[in-house]
Image (cartoon, rainbow, N blue to C red):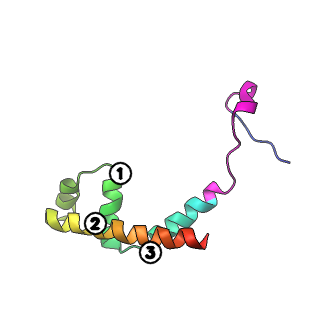
Amino acid sequence: MREVAFADPHRVGEQRAPSPHGPVEARDLLAQLRLLRPRERTVLLLVGEGEQVSQVARSLGLPVETAFSRLRLCRKHLAHVLKRWRRLR
């Protein structure tokens, strides 16, 4: 048995202990992101951080249409990678 710290010890019965599998799954998902093409992954990550596609295109020196295309392709590829990852888990 191991101890788990809780923000409010009086509410221990109401809170769930964090899963020890969370960090492992997070590392595995990040490894899956590395399978994406770097030029597409960059657009996806920047948009994921809240940047507008037009801003991303400008900062990377791309036409807006190219940035949208890379984002679409990366999302499609990511969906395929995650689907395969879920089957293997």
Instruction: Name the residue type under label 2.
Output: Arg
Instruction: Name the residue type under label 1.
Output: Glu
Q: What is the C-alpha distance between the residues marked 1 and 3? A: 19 Å
Instruction: Name the residue type under label 3.
Output: Leu
Contact flag, marks 1 and 3 (Cβ < 8 Å): no
Q: Quadrant of residue 68?
A: bottom left
Residue 62 seen anywhere in this rendered image of the structure:
no
Q: Earlier in the sequence, mark 2 or mark 3?
A: 3
Residue 16 falls within the magenta-colored stretch: yes
Q: Nearer the viewer, mark 2 or mark 3?
A: 2
Give the secondary structure at mark 1: loop
Q: Residue at x 73, y 38 (%)?
A: 5
In-image side of 59 versus 38 (left or right): left
Write down the residue under mark 3. 35
Among all residues in the image, which is located at the extreme right?
Answer: 1
Q: What is the C-alpha distance between the residues marked 2 and 3? A: 16 Å
Q: What is the C-alpha distance between the residues marked 1 and 2? A: 16 Å
Residue 72: numbered disc = 2
Residue 49: numbered disc = 1
Contact flag, marks 2 and 3 (Cβ < 8 Å): no
Give the secondary structure at mark 3: loop
Q: Quadrant of the C terminus?
A: bottom right
Q: Residue at x 46, y 72 (%)?
A: 81
Range drawn in magenta: 7-23
Residue 37 higher or lower than 1, as above or below: below
Residue 22 higher or lower than 11, as above or below: below
Q: Earlier in the sequence, mark 1 or mark 2?
A: 1
Pinpoint residue 4: horizontal percent, then vertical percent.
Answer: 75, 41
Q: Nearer the viewer, mark 1 or mark 2?
A: 2
